[in-house]
């Protein structure tokens, strides 16, 4: 018994038709074939347990039916939600979706792009932010590879700020951070700390800019001693909590804005480990509105991006580009403030920060 899978030639022989006719039936071609002939081909395929060679067919059609989603960290719920949205739309239109974890490393990103070019991916969705560092040596190679991929007819969409020349749908990171900071100010907080994201990542710097802008417009001078380095992870939030706890009592803020929800979760855990009560001792907000944000205690005030919908919008733009439909080059995805129990008015906060 042969171990080789039956081919379209075997199907044609079993059905007593030409290879061309069998191929038309199995590919769903609109070329006219009599109903009797069609039935014979389908019966032969079932008897032989024939499985069409999708790769060969896609290469012949110059379409792979493959959409790749490049994420900064596939363990980060932010990227998981966005990727889920892309997958929902792409798969419903017959596309296979693969997730490529770049670990925010331009060398890994370049390697993935080369592989996706080799496999003739139809679309690539960049979910992570680009770098503000123009001296990254791989960036020119990435730019060149993007141009090659686009010249081949593939579609590329950015779902975060990026220097690459491609259509984009970007969350309003600056505006969302501005509104969150304004909300804290409206609650009466004037000493507001900020836990940053990676220094070279555009989206982190946009959120920092929104925070600074809200303070300045409210007559509050930004205080760099209230900036704590973070890296978008819970571990980074815990480190920031340790640094906050080391501040002299009179220098401690009454509120802190974490650059993303993961950082906020780590910050909340870390502060509790140091004996802080939340939100009585300090109000905390994040950014992203991950599913866990409403489940932590206290529930986290944050900026909602509707991450799955962002992913769905990105996939729809990919499909529109592949179908040569008119689509805007740049879109801004709105953010809204979700007010929860982790932030309270300054007047309601206890004064025991100074008593620690």
Image: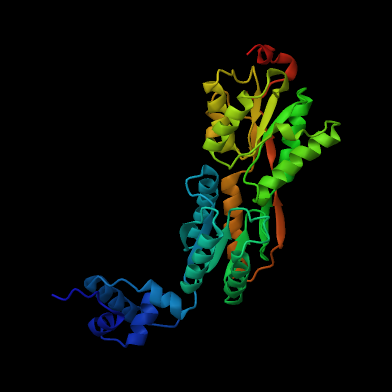
Asked if residue 114 is positioned above or below residue 82 in the image, the reply reads: below
Residue 254 placement (x, y as % from top left): 70, 22
Q: On the picture, is 110 further left or further right than 173?
A: left
Q: Seen from this angle, which residue lies furthest left?
A: 1
- Residue shown at the point (61%, 76%) measured from the top left: 151
Give 314 or 276, whichever is nearer the viewer.
276
Q: Is residue 7 left or right of residue 163?
A: left
Q: Which residue is situated farthest in the bottom direction here?
A: 18
Looking at the image, which is closer to me, 309 or 126?
126
Quarter in which the C terminus is drawn: top right
Taking depth in this image into account, of 70 and 225 the one nearest to the observer is 225
Residue 275 at what x, y percent from top left?
A: 55, 17
**Does 240 appear above or below 164?**
above
Q: Quarter of the image holding residue 137?
A: bottom right
Q: How many marks on residues?
A: 0
Residue 313 in view (yes/no): yes
Q: Position of residue 189 (x, y in %)?
A: 76, 24
What percent of the width, then of the height, locates residue 119? 46, 71
Determine if residue 334 is in view.
no
Left or right of 231? Residue 28 is: left
Q: What residue sits 27% from the left and 74% below the top?
A: 45
Res. 3 image quadrant:
bottom left
- The quadrant of the picture occupied by the N terminus is bottom left
Q: Is residue 240 above or below residue 74?
A: above
Tell me which residue sits at (82%, 33%) in the image. 221
| Colouring of the image | rainbow
């Amino acid at each position: 018994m042969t171990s080789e899978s039956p081919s379209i030639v075997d199907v044609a022989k079993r059905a007593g038709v030409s290879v061309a006719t069998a191929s038309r039936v199995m590919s769903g071609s609109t070329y006219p074939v009599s109903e009797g002939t069609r039935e014979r081909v389908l019966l032969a395929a079932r008897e032989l347990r024939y499985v069409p060679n999708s790769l060969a067919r896609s290469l012949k059609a110059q379409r792979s039916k493959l959409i790749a989603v490049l994420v900064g960290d596939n363990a980060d719920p932010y990227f998981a939600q966005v990727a889920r949205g892309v997958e929902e739309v792409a798969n419903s239109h017959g596309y296979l979706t693969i997730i490529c974890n770049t670990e925010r490393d331009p060398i890994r990103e370049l390697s993935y792009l080369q592989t996706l070019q080799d496999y003739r991916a139809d679309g690539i969705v960049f979910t992570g932010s680009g770098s503000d560092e123009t001296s990254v040596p791989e960036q020119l190679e990435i730019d060149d590879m993007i141009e090659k991929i686009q010249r081949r007819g593939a579609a590329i969409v950015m779902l975060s700020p990026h220097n690459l020349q491609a259509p984009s749908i970007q969350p309003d990171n600056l505006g969302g951070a501005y509104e969150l900071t304004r909300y804290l100010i409206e609650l009466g907080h004037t000493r507001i700390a900020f836990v940053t994201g990676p220094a070279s990542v555009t989206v982190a710097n946009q959120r920092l800019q929104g925070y600074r802008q809200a303070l300045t417009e409210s007559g509050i001078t930004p205080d760099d001693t209230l900036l704590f380095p973070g890296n978008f992870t819970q571990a980074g939030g815990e480190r920031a909590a340790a640094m906050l706890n080391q501040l002299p009592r009179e220098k401690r803020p009454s509120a802190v804005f974490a650059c993303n929800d993961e950082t906020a979760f780590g910050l909340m855990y870390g502060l509790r480990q140091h004996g802080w009560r939340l939100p009585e001792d300090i109000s905390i907000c994040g950014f992203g509105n991950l599913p866990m944000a409403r489940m932590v205690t206290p529930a986290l005030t944050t900026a909602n991006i509707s991450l799955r919908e962002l992913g769905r919008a990105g996939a729809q733009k990919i499909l529109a580009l592949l179908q040569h439909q008119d689509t805007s080059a740049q879109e801004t995805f709105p953010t809204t403030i979700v007010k929860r129990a982790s932030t309270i008015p300054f007047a309601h906060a206890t004064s025991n920060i100074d008593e620690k």
